[in-house]
Image (tube, rainbow, N blue to C red):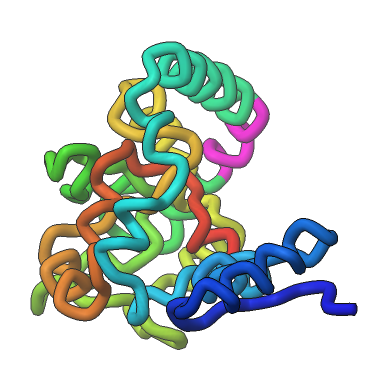
Amino acid sequence: KIDTLVITDSITGINNTRKILKYKLTGTQIYDYFSFFEEVEEKVPVNSIDENWILYGKGYAILNEDLNVKIKRFLDIIYALIIGSITLPVMLLSAIIIKLESKGPIVCKQLRVGEGNKEFTIYKFRSMKNDAEKDGAKWATIGDSRITRFGNFMRKTRIDELPQLWNVLKGEMSFVGPRPERMVFIKELEKQIPFYNIRHCIKPGLTGWAQVKY
């Protein structure tokens, strides 16, 4: 009376294969380790995956299906216009507060890496002091003294990301996709995370899996 069977190693022997197949045909759910981990934890064990996991992984075909690409682009434009219209008062109010709170531009621009490893200019409401990167690019940390008081609120509520709706309308980003990162940080992440660069096979998103699940 097994409900679920998780296979964490290669199956050897025809008898073992037939036994597992018998379970499968009588209703038992059969998982490999990666599929089970992904479904239960809602994340991928990146330090354990290999080329085969990517080679046989599902979902890649939709990247090149013309109809799917056009539908996604259409929905990106619709969502960007709707969200932009709804949040316009919030963006105007945020712009005023940013200007009053500290010196510097209301919207900051940064180069990020997008589809095909091409860099593009991303737009964000400035949430840090104007001289935040005088010593070079750094990861933001908890309690970071460079972040302004209203900037901290914007980061928690994601208001600082709203100007990226313009990037979506321009076609540089999608509404949903992996968050774009800066080249200087990508070089570090590629050393730590296997196959990290594969994320650049699609457009980056205004919101993505990591942002929602973090």
Query: In front: 32, or 162?
Result: 32
Q: Based on the displayed image, in which of its 4 quarters is residue 17 positioned? A: bottom right
Image coordinates of residue 213 in percent, x first then y, are 59, 66
Residue 90 visible in the current orientation: yes
Q: In the image, is 18 to the left or to the right of 164? A: right
Q: In the image, is 181 to the left or to the right of 167? A: left
Q: Which residues are magenta?
A: 86-93
Q: Is residue 114 above or below residue 89?
A: below
Q: Based on the displayed image, in which of its 4 quarters is residue 69 positioned? A: top left
Residue drawn where x is 45% and y is 41% of the image: 59
Image coordinates of residue 185 in percent, x first then y, are 18, 69
State yes or no: residue 90 in magenta. yes
Residue drawn where x is 83% and y is 78% of the image: 2
Q: Is residue 154 above or below residue 188?
A: above
Q: Is residue 144 above or below residue 111?
A: below
State yes or no: residue 24 in magenta. no
Residue 214 visible in the current orientation: no
Residue drawn where x is 34% and y is 67% of the image: 128
